Image: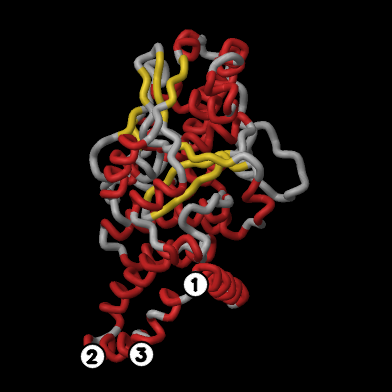
């Protein structure tokens, strides 16, 4: 994991059109009566109605989530996925249910405020051009305003501090990173019924509205508000690719710039937890989490690379130096083979990556 990437995205804000929206109405909206979470940790039948309250989320762990069907995971609250993976790490101040209730309350306040604001925004240029962008941008700005007060930390992410990797740290401190801010956006969108997806590239994460017809990105680390007006940033895929230095292979492989499913998102959260184990030199648990992450998100080259690194650290304990040299020589392909994909035209690269991904899934 490359914690400096979060800081690197600050340069993107200098080349984007800053969209201004009125947010005072959110600041003036009183807290609404709390409504129970619509997502339950106990998903048994994908066709069954979800219970209206959160019941005993502690009975589930990451292995339970990985074992679920895609249909079950697609109905799951992204916040709950994140909290379950991050549970048990040091620093948590509340239960999973308490964290979910906080975000439920924020979601209800935003639902009421945005509903009222939309009646007044019908003539605004941004709303006329793209009402969905207005809604998501207003959400980002309102979260950054004084009433809720979510801010983005300028410090590099420390993988040894789980509060910087999982949403419970953001909820406790109201200070987020590029690992946690997008989770909050996804959680609010889940409560409002919006088709917001997670997106990753070069260890940075952001959000995207993607309903199959309308598609735009929402950077999760750049919203600002003074309580009256605010701004947010929507960055094109081309700008992300350039400023993050994304390789064509990463895009062709189906990871970078892709709208993530909840299973792939689960893989990202497991990668974050592996980063914590890595920072604390627990190579065994880092490898275990990365194996799970790769099973969820086989298209991710970042997870693949991280897994190879973790397995290398464990190999230092299991094999002699000479044995490791022999294995390394066997693993390294001839120079001609190593450049085969780079020499392919982009359309052939995508076909080859799809073939390799399918073969990986068939072998699981």
Count neighbours of disc 2 (C-alpha within 10 A) and say few if under 14, some if 14 to 19, many if 20 or more. Answer: few
* Alpha-carbon span between mark 3 and mark 1: 28 Å
Residue at left offset 32%, top offset 43%: 9
Residue 117 locus on image (x, y percent): 56, 14
Compared with residue 3, is residue 337 higher up or lower down, i.e. above or below?
Answer: below
**Label 2 vs label 3: CA separation?**
13 Å
Q: Are marks 2 and 1 in contact (CB under 8 Å)?
A: no
**What residue would you read off at disc 1?**
345
Binning the other alpha carbons within 10 Å of mark 1 as few (below 14), some (14 to 19) or many (20 upward) gives few
Per the image, the residue denoted by label 3 is 330
Query: Can you tell which of label 2 and label 3 is closer to the viewer?
Result: 3
Q: Along the polypeptide, which appears first: circle 2 or circle 1?
A: 2
Determine the secondary structure under disc 1.
loop
Which is more N-terminal, label 3 or label 2?
Answer: 2
Q: Residue at x 23, y 39 (%)?
A: 155
Q: Position of residue 79 (x, y in %)?
A: 51, 40
Task: Reply above or below: 110 against 176.
Answer: above
| Rendered view: 134 above or below 248 | above
Label total for image:
3
Q: Nearer the viewer, mark 3 or mark 1?
A: 1
Pointer 2: what residue?
322
């Amino acid at each position: 994991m490359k914690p400096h990437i979060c800081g690197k995205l600050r340069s993107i804000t200098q080349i984007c059109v800053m969209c201004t929206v009125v947010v005072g109405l959110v600041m003036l909206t009183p807290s609404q009566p709390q409504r129970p979470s619509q997502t339950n940790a106990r998903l048994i039948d994908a066709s069954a109605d979800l219970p209206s309250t959160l019941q005993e989320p502690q009975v589930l762990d990451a292995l339970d989530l990985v074992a679920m069907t895609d249909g079950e995971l697609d109905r799951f609250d992204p916040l709950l996925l994140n909290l379950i993976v991050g549970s048990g790490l040091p620093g948590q101040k509340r239960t999973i249910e308490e964290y979910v209730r906080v975000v439920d309350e924020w979601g209800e306040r935003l639902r009421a405020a945005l509903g009222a604001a939309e009646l007044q925004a019908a003539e605004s240029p941004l709303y006329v051009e793209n009402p969905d962008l207005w809604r998501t941008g207003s959400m980002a700005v309102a979260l950054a305003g004084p009433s809720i007060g979510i801010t983005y930390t300028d410090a590099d992410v420390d993988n040894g501090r789980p509060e910087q990797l999982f949403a419970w740290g953001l909820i406790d401190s109201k200070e987020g990173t590029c690992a946690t801010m997008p989770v909050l956006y996804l959680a609010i969108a889940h409560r409002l019924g919006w088709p917001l997806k997670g997106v990753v590239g070069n260890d940075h994460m952001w959000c995207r509205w993607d309903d199959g017809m309308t598609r735009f990105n929402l950077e999760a680390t750049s919203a600002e508000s003074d309580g009256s007006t605010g701004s947010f940033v929507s960055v094109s895929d081309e700008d992300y690719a350039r400023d993050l230095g994304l390789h064509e292979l990463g895009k062709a492989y189906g990871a970078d710039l892709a709208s993530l499913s909840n299973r792939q998102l689960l893989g990202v959260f497991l990668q974050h937890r592996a980063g914590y184990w890595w920072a604390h030199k627990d190579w065994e648990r880092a490898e275990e989490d990365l194996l799970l992450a790769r099973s969820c998100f086989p298209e991710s080259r970042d997870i693949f690379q991280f897994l190879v690194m973790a397995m290398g650290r464990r190999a230092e304990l299991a094999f002699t130096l000479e044995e490791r040299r022999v294995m390394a020589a066997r693993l390294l392909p001839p120079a001609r083979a190593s450049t085969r994909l780079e020499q392919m035209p982009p359309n052939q690269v995508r076909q080859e990556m799809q073939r390799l991904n399918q073969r990986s899934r068939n072998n699981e």
